[in-house]
Amino acid sequence: MKTKRKIPSAPSVRRLPSYLTIVKQLQHEGNEHVSGTLIAREMGLESIQIRKDLAITGITGKPRIGYPVEGLVDAIERFLGWYDVQDAVLVGVGNLGSALMGYREFQSHCLNFVAAFDTDPRKIGARVHGIYVLSMETLEIEVRQWGIKIAVLTVPAEEAQAVTDILVRAGIEGIWNFTNVKLKVSDNVMVQREDLSSGYAMLSVMMKIKDKTVKKSS
Amino acid sequence: MKTKRKIPSAPSVRRLPSYLTIVKQLQHEGNEHVSGTLIAREMGLESIQIRKDLAITGITGKPRIGYPVEGLVDAIERFLGWYDVQDAVLVGVGNLGSALMGYREFQSHCLNFVAAFDTDPRKIGARVHGIYVLSMETLEIEVRQWGIKIAVLTVPAEEAQAVTDILVRAGIEGIWNFTNVKLKVSDNVMVQREDLSSGYAMLSVMMKIKDKTVKKSS
């Protein structure tokens, strides 16, 4: 069984990339300190939540001064391990795969796609957002040879487990799974499943709650 | 300020679509009841977490019997408002937009794209996954005319706020925002921001924790 419990509060971890974007922008603008209140406003959250979220990285703000901008960037990147470039492969160059390959934020988060893999002969040999698409037949050997540890899985659901088995054999230790399949892997392989419907569930609930309280709000 | 606090536990809400997929599959296979333990195994979570998550929909399982499958599907769909078809527009037909337009799960969640919008003359008039792409110039009039309440935003960051202003003027009440821009909207418009880096943050933390505990595990 995957031990989700060991992980610090999932919503806090999920928000860290947003903090990083905000704080890096402030750093870029030459700020040395940032108040929790300012971050709270940018995030649309309460200040107490900001303090709790950032505390998981080991950093605490000072009264009246706030957080040191550089220290905050360092703390978040260290906590996430986003200071060293992490090489990764992407498997399944469909619309979603292509979108992820072109997602610029990943580069600033040190996620580097060294190659993508697909079974479609028309895609193999092409470059998508500058990244070469290689034949799925070479997946195992290439991943092993390069010592890649991270794979992003955007294949059709029916291929998900078979591709996963190859990835695990080749030494992959972390799979970011965009299929709706619950992958079977050994305990030493981490799987983060991304369900695009989750966000729509949140939006649906927010809209329902608003409809109920709309009379009260201005 | 958006009132995230009013919303039931965000991780629980985010997991509901996964529950729905599992339970609908069981329903399809002719099961009348499902135990919390079985759902827990499918989700890779503890049984107590399953009970807490499902309790937000108002349903409780019975000892030794579990949950009625049909009742559970109903409760989740009612809680999310996913029983009536919700018409939506998608704005920005790039890779990510195209991927979302072709994402089959949305249909089973009653999310129906009536049209997509783009500024690219080569895309306008074409159909993507069966959905017509219309000119951005007609966005306001079409949304207002059809009475659409939900918009999915997949435009480039620099266009995000301008498009949002049009959407809000046209009567949109919920925006599912895939850009990394914090949108300024009036209090009666709900925004769910989707940061694709969030999942990578989770994976990074899981892999770091595993590296530390790898000696202990089998």
Image (cartoon, coloured by chain):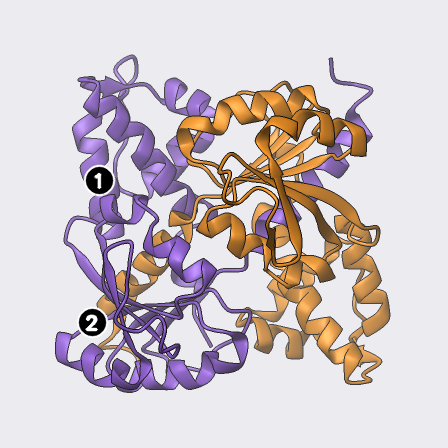
Chain colours: A orange, B purple
Residue A81 placement, left or right of A184: right
Q: Find disc 1 in the rendering and name its residue.
A: B75
User: Which mark is nearer the camera, 2 or 1?
Assistant: 2
Q: Find numbered disc 1 in the image and state the secondary structure of the residue it sits on.
A: helix
Which quadrant holds residue B18?
top left
Mark nearer the N terminus (2 vs 1): 1
Q: Can residue B44 be seen in this view?
A: no
Q: Which residue is at the front of the view, B156 or A77?
A: B156
Residue B102 placement, left or right of A215: right
What number is the disc on residue B148? 2
Q: Residue at x 75, y 35 (%)?
A: A148
Q: Which residue is drawn at 73% across and 72% down?
A: A23
Q: Can residue A114 be seen in this view?
A: yes
* Residue A49 pos. (x, y %): 60, 62
Locate the C terminus of chain B by quadrant: top right
Q: How crowded is mark 1: few (under 14 residues within 10 Å), some or many (20 or more)?
A: some
The chain that hosts pointer 1 is: B
Q: What residue type is labelled 2?
A: Ile
